[in-house]
Amino acid sequence: MALSSESSTSRDARQKITIQNVSRSYESTRALADVSFSVAEGEFCCVVGPSGCGKTTLLRAIAGLDDPDGGSILVGGDPVTGPGLDRGMVFQEYALFPWRTVRGNIRFGLDRPACDCADCEGRVRELIDLVGLDGVEDAYPKELSGGMKQRVGIARALAPDPDILLMDEPFGSVDARTRDRLHAELLDIWTQTGQTVVFVTHDIDEAVTLADRVVVMDNDPGTVQSTFSIDLERPRERTSRGFVEYVARIRDELGSPADNNV
Amino acid sequence: MNTRTDSSSDAVVATSFEGDLRRYLRGLGGLFVFLLVWWVGAVMTQPSYLVPGPLDSAHAFIDLFGSSTAIVVPVVGSNLVLPTGLAHLVQTLLHYVPGLLLGASCGIGLGLLMGWNGALDDWLRPLIRVLRPIPPLAWIVFAIVWFGIHHTGAAFIVFVGAFWINFYGAYGGVEGVSSELTDAASTLGVERDLSMLKLVALPSAAPQVLTGFRTSIGRCWMIVVGAELFGAPGVGYEIINASNNLAMATSVAYMFLISLAFLCMDVGFRLFERRALAWR
């Protein structure tokens, strides 16, 4: 069953994020139960699982937006006590400030006192270039398509130059073709910036396309079921044998509890 | 392909233009019928002062600007000579504008703070439940004993009216701020509550705040005229003053002057609102 799962707590030297025995309950449901794994510096880690497995809760806990009941989360060796500019977050429904233009949204994190950029305007231009938003700098979010909005979301999260990028099903609401383009662009950006990425999704194909390592979670209560290292060259071809095999193995893993029940 | 899109968009433009034209024509028709009914009613009513006709009223309106009146500007203390209608309108504005602006500022300020701060909300909510139902004009007794029924007293009544409408606009607006946006702001380095209020809650509540203010523009005209019926100087006082002399056409002229002033302010503010909320 756990044929390729690996013990993740033993590796420690270059761990950027360490999650230890994290639990979180809401009223009657246990969103997270004793979740432990870690993410290496510069690693692209995808967390997949059915809805309700607590993957978003976990991501919010890393961001410092949610306070777990038990366990600890270390980022760069320090416990997370709240949100910080070292962790940028990209939201599923974009969460752009509708009253700010594209430029204004990207600029938001740079205007905070905690962030001291020498040339903020230059940085904004650089990011607009990076995510391919030239020509719509002065548009408001309502004028943009879903894919464009998420480009703004990514640029905004990247602006303060965080060590870690947390992404919560960021491409869940864009069409398949745009999603493929955004995958390629995201991998380009990641290669350039070398950030540690935690990417939550329920789409196994998406996880295998992007990740160095896939953490598979199960629901009710949310636990880590297994992890897979994806040893495939990028860019990855979805029809290649290796790709299809990984997808099948992860799907088996996700499907197994239901099989047991039957 | 191209031509088809073009012609269909042309058709849309044409129908919306026809729709506009039809609406204007119907609106003009409604006005015309009203004037006709008014005129017939005025001709048939005896004694004639009971219903002044549209023509008499129009004459009275023009006459408002045919003579001059001196008014005293408060604080400055100097005399100002203006055409009579304008002079009384200025008198009204002298307490309407300060009352509206001050009431709106206080109402918006408290609404934002209460909508944002749960503890303050707990403290003040019962008190507000008790005070809110009191009609602003009921405060006129205190306006009279505290300030006297002059500019300050009338401004006080307007203040009360503007306060509540703007309070609820801001309060509701802040309550509706999405937690997703405040989460996004937190991850982007907004730490203090006050910065969150300024950077996220206020702009996000702006549509409701502005709607509240626009509503208060109209409501305060009703209130200000009410206060003036008790004796504060201005157009409201002139309405009752004229009717005391049975110059009902002059009363009607002042009524239309109020309507005109309100329309100008409302249209002006709507234009501002549209520009300020271009992002919507």
Image (cartoon, coloured by chain):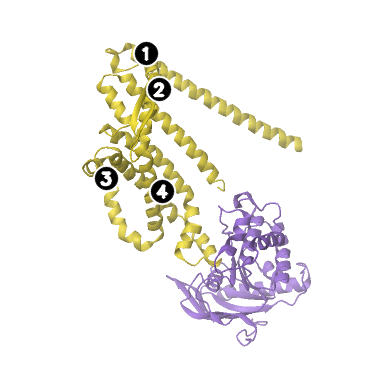
> Residue A184: x, y in percent?
73, 64
The image's mark for residue B40 is: 1
| Mark 3 or mark 2: whose residue is earlier in sequence | 2
Quadrant for residue A19, please give it. bottom right
The three-letter amino acid code for the residue at tag 3 is Ile
| Mark 1 or mark 4: whose residue is earlier in sequence | 1
What residue did someone put label 3 on?
B134
How far, Cα to Cα, is label 3 from label 1? 41 Å
Chain A, hue in figure: purple
* Host chain of mark 3: B
**Front-most of A112 and B134?**
A112
The three-letter amino acid code for the residue at tag 1 is Val
How far, Cα to Cα, is label 3 from label 4? 18 Å
How far, Cα to Cα, is label 1 from label 4? 44 Å
The image's mark for residue B65 is: 2
What residue did someone put label 4 on?
B169
Residue at screen point 56% across, 71% down: A59
Are the two marked residues, 3 and 1, in contact with CB atoms closer than 8 angstroms?
Answer: no
